[in-house]
Image (cartoon, rainbow, N blue to C red):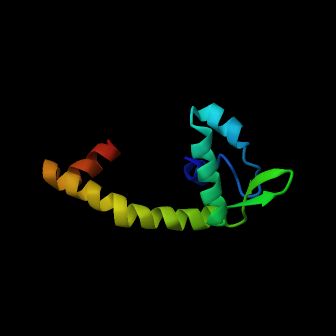
């Protein structure tokens, strides 16, 4: 959810992220879950911490997140979607036609 918000431009590079409690309350999430997500983003270098101030989106985070998310999509998500399409007997041209209609 946080990575998606950064990729969608809701939080730009250099922007301060809301506090864990605030983000959890706004999104109906468990604060522990949000804290773990913040920690993962920090561990991966997508956010930086300024002691006493808060967490901020790191420079270059958007490009690096996009690369990571594309790789995850292509290796984990797309194969399942493709298999589902094949199970349902959907012609890929039908999908494209629906999207352009």
- Measured as percent of width and height from the top left, residue 31 is found at 62, 40
- Measured as percent of width and height from the top left, residue 71 is found at 44, 67
Question: Which one is nearer the viewer's eye here, 17 or 78?
Answer: 17
Q: Quadrant of the C terminus?
A: top left
- Measured as percent of width and height from the top left, residue 72 is found at 43, 63
Lateral position of residue 71 relative to residue 17, left or right: left
Residue at the farthest right position? 52
Q: Residue at x 59, y 34 (%)?
A: 27
Question: Which one is nearer the viewer's eye here, 9 or 93?
Answer: 9
Question: Which one is nearer the viewer's eye here, 99 or 35?
Answer: 35
Q: Residue at x 57, y 31 (%)?
A: 28
Lateral position of residue 6 relative to residue 80, left or right: right
Q: Residue at x 64, y 32 (%)?
A: 26
Q: Is residue 23 above or below residue 86?
A: above
- Measured as percent of width and height from the top left, residue 25 is found at 64, 32
Q: Residue at x 70, y 36 (%)?
A: 22
Q: Residue 76 is drawn in which quadrant?
A: bottom left
């Amino acid at each position: 959810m946080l990575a998606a918000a950064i990729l969608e431009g809701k939080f730009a590079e250099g922007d301060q992220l809301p506090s864990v409690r605030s983000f959890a309350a706004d999104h109906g999430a468990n604060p522990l879950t949000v804290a773990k997500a913040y920690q993962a983003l920090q561990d991966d270098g997508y956010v930086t911490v300024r002691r006493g101030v808060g967490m901020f989106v790191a420079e270059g985070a958007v490009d690096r997140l996009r690369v990571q998310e594309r790789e995850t999509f292509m290796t984990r998500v797309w194969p399942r979607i493709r298999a589902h399409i094949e199970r349902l007997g959907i012609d890929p041209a039908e999908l494209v036609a629906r999207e352009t209609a």
